[in-house]
Amino acid sequence: MYRSHVLVCGGTGCTSSHSGELIEALEANIKEKGLEEEIKVVRTGCFGLCALGPIMIVYPEGCFYSEVKVDDIPEIVEEHLLKGRIVKRLLYKETVEAENVKPLSETNFYKKQHRVALRNCGVIDPENIEEYIAYDGYAALAKALTEMTPEDVIKTVIDSGLRGRGGGGFPTGRKWSFTAANKADQKYVVCNADEGDPGAFMDRSVLEGDPHCLVEAMTICGYATGATEGYVYVRAEYPIAVQRLQKAIDDAREYGLLGKNIFGSGFDFDLFVRLGAGAFVCGEETALMTSIEGNRGEPRPRPPYPAVKGLFGKPTTENNVETFANIPQIILKGAEFFNTMGTETSKGTKVFALGGKINNTGLVEVPMGTTLREIIEDIGGGIPNGKKFKAAQTGGPSGGCLPADLLDIKIDYDNLVAKGAMMGSGGLIVMDEDDCMVDIAKFFLKFTVDESCGKCTPCRVGTRRLLEILEKITSGKGTMEDLERMEYLCNYIKENSLCGLGQTAPNPVLSTYQRFRDEYIAHVVDKKCPAGVCKDLVTYSIDKDKCIGCGVCARNCPVDAITRTEYIAPGHKLASFSIDTDKCVKCGVCVGNCKFKAVIK
């Protein structure tokens, strides 16, 4: 029996910030003080507040230490773990409250969250099956196999109102029912863990922090639909997630929770991992299945849908990680537990990867219907450096942008689609006044151009032509006719592409053009980038009234474009500098180095 537990984040973000070294230092210092029998160190998954990593929580006090360094460990062990004196200088500042420590659940980042899919992330050791079982793990599977028929399971999922969290938002229970209705000698369950959106890390965090929930959910799905085999298709770029998932599968087999005659029910189910090579198009379900089969990951025409002819030509149910992560709680606690959260058409919670120009970068899970303002200002802590919020991109390269006048929109599937955006898998990129929306559209489109599988002409050629138009506009060579061609081409690609990648590729262009048309016009007519981002439309000069002649800009210019001049002020001859615009490569080094804001962009 330990008197204290020290939970250290072992997710990818904190691991990259050397949390592994913190754990080694903790264990060494604890041993040195003879506290091995009193203090337990636990490597968990992601806590959510990624901007503050490495993160450490000490229980029972609930002290939340943030941005911890290896050099801080001896002090924490000596003062807190040995002497019982909290090291306040290392606490997350919002938890410090006079003589007390505020619970993490009462901080702005956490108090509006409701964790279902992320319930165990940052709470348990993801590599210890017994900890998962202690938190009601596999109880839902036991209930499904021993107390419910497959039809009961599907009805519960339907009644919960759960919709697919991978982007499409199709009702999960209905999808399961389609597969269950088809008779076949073999059926499959597939999990899409091929998370490819820039800035998205929701599925990765679930796999790293709570892999057993996926094993349990996919087994329940297999029982409900009549499948006996499952495959998790996960990005090879997620080594920690892959390792923990494989261990979870191996441990579940060892405990009799995978394999033959699970819980003595006569039901057999086994699970396997397949690694993706990083192709974004393999996030599309038919391309994913084609890849699992050992072929080039290209989408197939639908119909037939996977419920009829999916993996290896057999009926298949496919959902993403977050969708599956909700299943055990729905089965264990009932449909009402889930459908009482959210909105009329979008039930439950949604996980978002909050990134970009935001103070609290990280992972959040909120009830559907939470407003964009609450996520950005309350949970996210607002925009850094006093900048103004400009837009938020939801749904990644397939989504659209929401401008400042839509900050109070309630986030759910239908509201976002009605405003030209989409939920997507949950990436939420925040932009401020320094972002150029034409450049943002070009960034996302370039991504989809690179990731197009090339199978259909509208996507392979159309997105390339669309990118060329945007490049022409951002280089100051665009015309009003280009804007008309751009809009026409966007609609053509949406209507004629084979799969979801091509059908949604124009979304960032259309939504930014609709919401920020004045910026496009400025690039085309005025040959200016209002945000000062597009290099070909930017010039640099020096305000001689502000310049003190220190020469820092000239010394740091990589192309010697800044030269010394003389400036005649009333009664004085002063040293100053000027920029040769023909030599200038517009790198911005001079702006960053001038402390007197004398360089004008």
Image (cartoon, grey):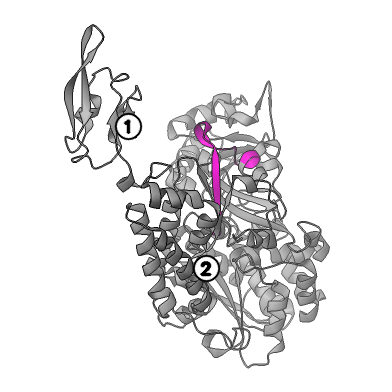
Q: Is residue 367 left or right of residue 593?
A: right
Residue at mark 1: 591
Determine the CA span between mark 2 and mark 1. Answer: 38 Å
Label 2 environment density (alpha carbons within 10 Å; few <14, some 14–19, many ≥20): many
Q: Nearer the viewer, residue 154 or 172?
A: 172
Quarter of the image with the C terminus is top left
Residue 141 position within the rendered picture, expressed as x and y whole percent measured from the top left = 72, 70
Q: Is residue 20 left or right of residue 543?
A: right
**Is residue 381 rendered magenta in the image?**
yes
Which kind of residue does numbered mark 1 sit on?
Val
Quarter of the image with the N terminus is top right
Residue 575 position within the rendered picture, expressed as x and y whole percent measured from the top left = 20, 17
Label 1 environment density (alpha carbons within 10 Å; few <14, some 14–19, many ≥20): some
Residue 213 visible from this viewpoint: no
> Does dot 2 land on a helix, a strand or a loop?
helix
Residue 449 position within the rendered picture, expressed as x and y whole percent measured from the top left = 39, 67
Which segment did they paint magenta? 377-395
Residue at mark 2: 504
Q: How many marks?
A: 2
Q: Residue furthest top?
A: 571
| Vertical comparison of 360 with 212: above or below | above
Q: Is residue 53 left or right of residue 176?
A: left
Give the mark, 2 or 1, whose residue is nearer the N terminus. 2
